[in-house]
Amino acid sequence: ITVSQSSSLIVSIPAASVCNGSTTNINAGAGFNSYIWSNGNNTQSITVAGGSYTVTVSDLSGCTGVGNVTVATNALPTLNIGQNLAVCAGSSATISPTTSYSSYAWLTGSSLQNITTTTAGTYTLTVTDSNGCTATDAVSVEIVNTPSVSLSNASVCVGNTTIIDAGAGFS
């Protein structure tokens, strides 16, 4: 009788990363009889936040293997599209983030980095960085009517002065 000893099982878990506050799925692979994860789960795949995880697997012959993976946690992007704006009627406002990102999704449907508007409203932008993490910011645009000033003619003698007053509400 010849008895051969099997080598330990190979467990290959692909590297993974998550955005801060999110979770991802890690998988020890198929073909094993049992799975025991360092977090207490006993399934082939588990949903986790960032951190280090170990799984011990076994097959029907009782052979075991160990796999490790560290799930990196990526910081969320910091998005700033500025403060609320007041724009004179007939003028436009350009709204743009202070940093560049991988992609842009304005609530208006635009995917450009900057948008220009002549319409009052709230403008919301969601950006995605190179890690796939997202952030959202919004700014309100107010359209202000152009002031109307009415001055009457005034006569001033040479060497004298006069006061011209635009009225209340102007500076």
Image (tube, rainbow, N blue to C red):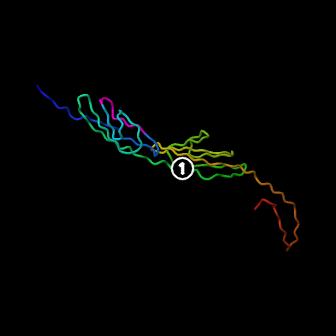
Q: Residue type at mark 1?
A: Leu
Q: Is residue 153 left or right of residue 117?
A: right
Write the residue at 33% across / 41% down. Answer: 38
The crowd level at tag 1 (other Cα within 10 Å; few <14, some 14-19, many 20+) is many
Displayed quadrant of residue 117:
top right
The foreground one among 62 and 74 is: 62
Q: Main secondary structure of the magenta part?
A: loop
Check disc 1 and report its element: helix, strand or loop: loop
| Residue segment shown in magenta | 24-33
Write the residue at 56% across / 51% down. Answer: 80
The foreground one among 94 and 40 is: 40
- Residue 170: x percent and y percent? 77, 60
Residue under pointer 1 = 79
The foreground one among 160 and 49 is: 49
- Residue 126: x percent and y percent? 55, 43
Q: Residue furthest left?
A: 1
The foreground one among 124 and 91 is: 124
Residue 104 within the segment the image draws in magenta = no
